[in-house]
Amino acid sequence: MSEPARARRWPLAIGLLLLGSAGIAAAWILLADALGAQGAWMAVVAALDAALLVRLARLRPGLVRALAGTAATLLAIVIANWGIVATQLARPMGLMPWESALKLGPHHAWTLAGLANTPADLAWLGAGLVIAAVLAR
């Protein structure tokens, strides 16, 4: 395959990974809200989704593809934790979750996510990143 054809795949891959990260994060937020727990095991699902998406985009195997899959998984983890915190804050404040998400600052989100995630949750998040790196390569 020619080099320009490979270069044209990156916009598709980036779009797929951004859409996939947002989609899996939305499902994660809904699941966490329904369960009343963090649902950190969804990081592994996000890793599987990212690995599938880099393959669907037909990126060449290697370190760059592994980094792309890991970055997409990390993005899903960040979006999901932000959304979970925003959803939990929205109820007592009388806001919709997306209104709360827009008002939530990074320091406050980091503090609340740190309080909500147990060591087991952090292990699931780390496992998701490792699985993404391995499966996406």
Image: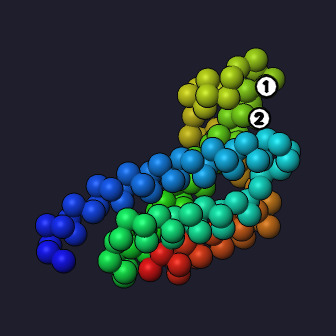
Q: Position of residue 87 (x, y in %)?
A: 72, 34
Q: CA distance from mark 1 to mark 2?
A: 6 Å
How packed mark 2 is, by other alpha carbons closer than 10 Å (few <14, some 14-19, many 20 or more), is some
- Relative horizontal placement of residue 68, taking residue 37 as reference (left or right): left
Q: What's the residue at 60%, 52% (across, down)?
A: 24
Front-lying residue, 20 or 99: 20
Q: Position of residue 118 (x, y in %)?
A: 80, 60
Q: Position of residue 89 (x, y in %)?
A: 74, 31
Q: What's the residue at 70%, 60% (across, down)?
A: 42
The residue wearing badge 1 is 91
Q: What's the residue at 54%, 72% (across, down)?
A: 132
- Which image quarter: residue 2? bottom left
Is residue 116 visible in the rendered structure shown here?
no
- Which image quarter: residue 111? top right
The residue wearing badge 2 is 88
Mark 1 element type: helix
- Circles 1, 2 touching at the beta carbon (< 8 Å): yes
What's the residue type where badge 1 is placed? Arg
